[in-house]
Image (cartoon, rainbow, N blue to C red):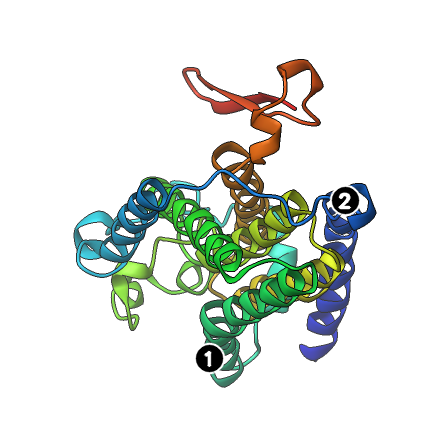
Amino acid sequence: MLRRPMTASLRTLTALWLFLLAPLSPALAQDAADTPDAPRALRFNWARDGVITGAAGALWISSETVFKGDLAPAQCRWCDRAPDGTDTLNRLDRWGRGLAGNTAESRKRADTWSNVIGFAGLPLSMLGVQYAAGRSSGASREFFAQDATIMVESAVIASVVNQAVKFTVGRERPFVHVLSENDKGLTAHPTDNNLSFYSGHTNLAFSLVVSAGTVASLRGYKHQGLIWGVGLPLAASVGLLRMGADKHYLSDVLTGAVLGSAFGVAVPLLLHGRLDDDARPNASRTSSLTLTPSVGRQVVGVSGAF
């Protein structure tokens, strides 16, 4: 009886992912014919980028291991319940939970596969596709080393921000939300109970894929569509699996995809623009990006000009 709505939710969510992600590939992957000087050199400094990547990576890993017990909220701050205990979960996330596995075994399997794809399959696939795209355009191994570093740099910066938001927001995970108060402290990892918003796996996946595609576009690599064609479905599958494991709501996953993609675009453009663009007057540059943070009483935002 439960399998039918789950299948319907899966079909609908898959269609939604494809609808949302389809514009990224043609919009960001430009024809190599438009860049006759490909592969183009990008701004890159091993000392600077090594420090940024290493520091962000150390912050991310230590916050997930050494300091997680101190940083993670013991009680939910975003509980999706009224003071009287009434469930106030929004309709979107309530509907999205139809993708969660029906049994403990199926949820565990989805969790395992989200880790395998998110932390091994997707990163290795993106590095392989990036290398192939670069070599087909005549890029040197040094260019590939730079590309890989930019991808990792984008991912670890995105992950540090994700951790900060998770620890601050303290949203209760879906599988914890349905437990009794007495059972919530008996989960396998209680420090993880209130870190639902937003999905770190999805954030990481999309930051890697979009940074790879953005770098390929800046370089002017041939066959850029291969990067998007391989990467976006893999990244989307990570988000779907996190929902299947009942670890995240749909809004957690969508936010992770959007913000991961934002870092995947912003880090390469802000830190690693084309060297030949730096030599041109501002008026003749093909593109530029400026970001201005704004902080209000209840809103933190970023405005930009492209």
Q: At which x and y percent is residue 87?
A: 49, 50
Query: Is 178 on the left or on the right of 58, as rendered?
Result: right
The amino acid pointed to by label 1 is Lys
In the rendered picture of this protein, how many numbered marks are placed on residues?
Answer: 2
- Residue at the spot of label 2: 36
**Which residue is drawn at the image coordinates 23% and 52% (left, top)?**
74
Q: What kind of element bears circle 2? A: loop
Q: Quadrant of the N terminus?
A: bottom right
The amino acid pointed to by label 2 is Pro
Query: Is 150 on the left or on the right of 96, as rendered?
Result: left
**Which residue is drawn at the image coordinates 47% and 22% (left, top)?**
299
User: Of residues 195 and 208, which is closer to you in this image?
Assistant: 208
Please give the label number shown on residue 108.
1
Q: At which x and y percent is residue 295?
A: 43, 17
Category of crowding for the residue at label 1, using alpha-carbon neighbours closer than 10 angstroms: few (below 14), some (14–19), many (at least 20)? some
Q: Quadrant of the C terminus?
A: top right
**Which residue is drawn at the image coordinates 44% and 65% (left, top)?**
175
> In the rendered image, is residue 236 in sight?
no
Q: At which x and y percent is residue 25?
A: 75, 51
Q: What kind of element bears circle 1? A: helix
In the displayed structure, would residue 249 be above or below residue 240? Answer: above
Q: Quadrant of residue 182?
A: bottom left
Q: Quadrant of residue 165?
A: top left
User: Of residues 113 and 6, which is closer to you in this image?
Assistant: 113
Which circle's residue, 1 or 2, is located before the other in the chain? 2
User: Of residues 113 and 228, which is closer to you in this image?
Assistant: 228
Query: Is 303 on the left or on the right of 157, as rendered?
Result: right
Q: Quadrant of residue 65?
A: bottom left
Query: Is 290 on the left or on the right of 189, as rendered?
Result: right
Please give the label number shown on residue 147.
none
Q: CA distance from mark 1 to mark 2?
A: 49 Å
